[in-house]
Amino acid sequence: MSDSTGPFRFAVNVTPKPGILDPQGRAVESSLGHLGIEGVRDVHVGRRVELTVEAADEAAARAVVERLAGELLSNPLIEAFSIERLGGEGSR
Amino acid sequence: MTVRVGVVVFPGSNCDRDTIHALTLAGADPVELWHEQASLDGAAAIVLPGGFAYGDYLRAGVIARFSPVMRAVAAFATAGGLVLGICNGFQVLAESGLVPGALLRNRNLRFVCRQVAIRPERLDSPFTRALPERATLRMPVAHGEGCYYADEATLDALEREGQVLFRYVGADGAIASPDAPANPNGSLRGIAGVANAAGNVAGLMPHPERAAEAILGSDDGMWLIRSLVESAAERARAGGGMVGSPR
């Protein structure tokens, strides 16, 4: 399976934008004391979406992922996203 | 001649029948609009009811945005048609970009289901015009993601342009700050409902249709429902074509 012909596997990581209220992150952070863990801060809870794209080449596949990450997987008012290229096709 | 008001039904909507009941009480002719249909069946106004459209997967309201009926609703809204989103319907409108801002997870992370007090910020909107005064209204909220958020510049602009329609208020009538007990979800500046710039699309988290009869504990919600029906009837009489055009 050649990596240049696809299919292409990606992950999209969606996180709250800096300064946006993140009560989940705060709840996780405040629970750490109960575990006896200290020195951990700036906890932010987001979402990770993994997907496989059929496309002519990696650039075309990435363009599809960019579009769906911006239009569907994240809300640009409150969330940022980053795209990660994963090795292999993943399970199908 | 009763005015036709469309109530959109997504898979997971659960306040559609209550909304239809309240609209009927207000003298309208409500029709259900299934999410897969691309026509609004000549409705003079549209209500997006509460519930959990498409299971609220990913983010509340986002999947509904891409349904055929929402493409028709967006076109209707852009053409000036009246659209009211209640609770999940508000989330759908925000995700669709038809009203400003976003609805975040409640500040305390809990699903909140209780009666709240809200105050209308203006009486000249299509959604509040039946109200005789800016009195406090009591109606329930029931949501997990109702914390209204927009950046500071947007919030200032909304206030300046009169797009804030409803705010949560305390017993003393003061605006409920994000941490106040009277603010059920942590909404910035106590915002419970907003309108778009043109004023024809509005969303709010509280449920007017659940406060439609005194036996339910409050009938204050009927002021909003009646306002919408009056506004829709007026537009249907005046224009006809624009509001009813099938797509």
Image (spheres, coloured by chain):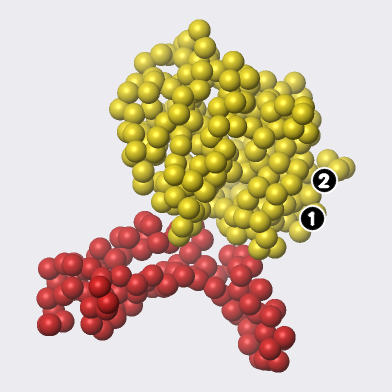
Residue under label 1: B180
- Left/right placement of residue A45 relative to residue B208 reads left
- Left/right placement of residue B104 relative to residue B73 reads right
Tell me where residue B7 appears, x and y as whole percent.
49, 30
Q: Which residue is drawn at 45% across and 29% down?
A: B32
* Chain identifier, yellow in the render: B
- Disc 1 is placed on an element classified as loop
**CB under 8 Å between callouts 2 and 1?**
yes
Tell me where residue B150 appears, x and y as whole percent.
57, 53
The amino acid at mark 1 is Ala
In the rendering, which numbered label is found on residue B101?
A: none
Residue under label 2: B170
The answer to whether one can see residue B43 in this image is yes
B185 to A65, vertically: above or below: above
Q: Which residue is drawn at 51% across and 18% down?
A: B29
- Disc 2 is placed on an element classified as loop
Q: Mark 1 lies on which chain?
A: B
